[in-house]
Image (tube, helix red, strand yellow):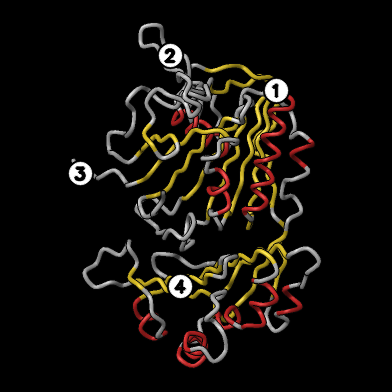
Amino acid sequence: MAKFDCPSCKLIVEKSMFNNPKSRHEYHVRDHHFNVAVDIFVPGCTKLPSDLQDVCPDNDVYWHIKQLPVLELVQLDFIQKFLRRGDFYALSSGTRIDTDNVVALLPNGELILSVTKDTYEELGLEGKPSKYDQRRKPTRYIVEVPLLNKSYQKGKSGYERVQWCLKDRLNLTFDILVAWKPAEGHHIELDTYWSNYTCNKIVVNKQTVLQTTSALSVPSINSCYLASKGHDQNENGRSQIQDNGQPVRERCQDNTNCASNDSDGGKEWCEAEEMFEWLGAISCGVSCTGKPDAFISTFSCPEPSLQVSGAVCHRWTGFITPGRIKEMLSRLRHYLTSTNSADWAAITVHGFADSPLSWHKHEHGYSTCGGENLYTFVVFPEDGGKYWYIMATGGNDDIS
């Protein structure tokens, strides 16, 4: 019988409080730059609360620009009008991170090129081998160009080198997705600025995954309880439960005794991984009734569970900025603490599978099990704003 190794993947869970000075929630949202989808799940209500609707990306737009030369992104006029006057995100479209050339541009002015060996040698810009290329002779390279660096000016060697390489040596062009939030009082339409190229404006798509008035079983969870005592890793060593970067044992962030399951008295709460799996099934539209005659799935809500009178889950897909997600998370916190109408709610953010980066400037690749890079905030209504942060990636992600 053939035996296959389990695909490498990573799961990290942190628990903290939003008002804790050491909380990293803003870092996690801000530095996950390229978001293709966001889900919100709110139990105990039959429609999305109006407070949340006001900040959801229903009317947000992004751009698809066809065959844009990378040379356009390194011009000083573009840098002055866009990078210095708002948050500008750009990512190549229709390119595969493991086989094609890929480009990304961050709001901090970092231009990232992930290119094949042939392109790298022809381009002539200095870079480094991809850390996920395990061959003896690298076949993929990462090139970084700091466009907002003070040395990136006409007459400087770095600037002139970039211009020459992208104009005279290799004129790289891509279909590019762009999300741009201009600074207050400053706005230029991309189709006006790049009138020589085909620029299509796209509205973020909204999908109702679940909206029910019927009773629904949801996992019973406790903000202090993540996993069984001593559960720091799974059997493959790839799933790590952390509390602000340290292995969780039996203490909460606020140094109070953390809840635990009593092996003699039965299980009181679901573990974070169980809840995360169930939430993923809900987001995919999978029925979790667990009926044995179900044709597609017999998956059921993990136990213990509790009954809620209705629930809603919406998904938005497109190119969604971290700033929008920050607003959604803040409003979700406010809704839970002000109404106390649910024991918890969740927001899940999915990154582009073929982005050259995941969090911060950490390299992202496509591994055996895919290019997933996503995170979930499970928000609780308690004082201090307790939350779980669940980060899931494939094996080719440098996360911290």
For residue 355, above or below residue 306:
below
Of residues 318 and 245, the one nearer the viewer is 245
Instruction: Check disc 3: other Cα within 10 Å, few if <14, some if 14-19, many if 20+.
Output: few
Q: Which residue is mark 1?
A: 340
Question: How far is mark 1 from mark 4, CA to CA?
Answer: 47 Å
Q: Amino acid at mark 1?
A: Asn
Question: How far is mark 2 from mark 1, CA to CA?
Answer: 25 Å
Q: Amino acid at mark 4?
A: Glu
x and y percentages locating residue 27 in the rendered image: 54, 49
Number of the label disc, if any, that sits on residue 321: none
Q: Is residue 20 visible?
A: yes
For residue 43, above or below residue 99:
above
Task: Tell me: 264 left or right of 148.
Answer: left
For residue 389, above or below residue 36:
above
Number of the label disc, if any, that sits on residue 267: 2
Q: Quadrant of residue 10?
A: top left
Q: Secondary structure at mark 1?
A: loop
Number of the label disc, if any, that sits on residue 144: 4
